[in-house]
Amino acid sequence: MRSKAVLAVVAGVLFALSAPGGAASKPAVSGLLANNLTPEKARAMQTALRPAIAALKNHINGTDALTDKQIEAHKLTIDSTKDIFGYNDAVIKACFDLVATYDEALAGADDAIDNTVTRSTPG
């Protein structure tokens, strides 16, 4: 789960959402027009994006392990659909949910590490 590939995907999603002028800050219609996307193409991109995000989320949660090739394929899907990150609430929520899932997994891993480390003082 804590692979560099997954971190790169999550960081890319977060950057695309939060960068000044990023997808989450653009109204859906003007974002589509600015990127020359028709609503039909945006829906097709959303159809590809949502399963990629779900698969990565399941990988992070440990539900379904992905191979490096599968992670790379999902990364390519996400990279190719960044123009629709602000398309609608469902896409924005799915992207932020992926980032939150990764953050929670890291926090849980840190807690597990912290709970197993003990220090003794020399006597």
Image (spheres, rainbow, N blue to C red):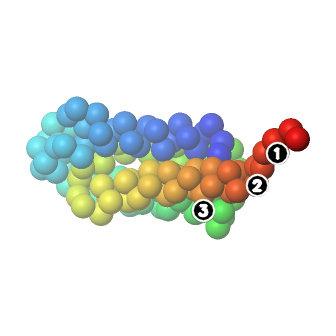
Task: Give the residue at mark 3.
Answer: 61
| Residue name at image x 68 percent, y 51 percent | 114
Earlier-in-chain disc, 1 versus 3: 3
SS for callout 2: helix
Question: Which image quarter: residue 121?
Answer: top right
Front position in the image: 102 or 87 = 102
Horizontally, residue 16 falls left or right of residue 74, namely left
The C terminus lies in quadrant: top right
Which amino acid lies under the numbered mark 3 shown in the image of this protein? Asn
Task: Give the residue at mark 2.
Answer: 116
Nearest to viewer (mark 2 / mark 1): 1
Local packing at callout 1 (Cα closer than 10 Å; few below 14, some 14-19, many 20+) is few
Q: Measure how far apart labels 1 and 3 are at the Cα level.
A: 33 Å
Residue 6 placed where, x, y %? 58, 44
Vertical position of residue 18 compared to residue 84: above or below: above
| Residue name at image x 15 percent, y 36 percent | 34
Q: Measure how far apart labels 2 and 1 are at the Cα level.
A: 13 Å
| Residue name at image x 46 percent, y 38 percent | 11
Which amino acid lies under the numbered mark 1 shown in the image of this protein? Ser
Badge number at residue 58: none
Vertical position of residue 29 compared to residue 65: above or below: above
Local packing at callout 3 (Cα closer than 10 Å; few below 14, some 14-19, many 20+) is some
Front position in the image: 32 or 112 = 112
Vertical position of residue 30 compared to residue 52: above or below: above
Horizontally, residue 23 falls left or right of residue 27, namely right
Residue 20 placed where, x, y %? 22, 32
Whether residue 49 appears in this view of the structure is no
Task: Give the residue at mark 1.
Answer: 120
Is the Cβ of the residue at disc 2 closer than 8 Å to that at disc 1?
no
Earlier-in-chain disc, 3 versus 2: 3
SS for callout 3: helix
What residue occupies the far top of the structure in this picture? Answer: 20
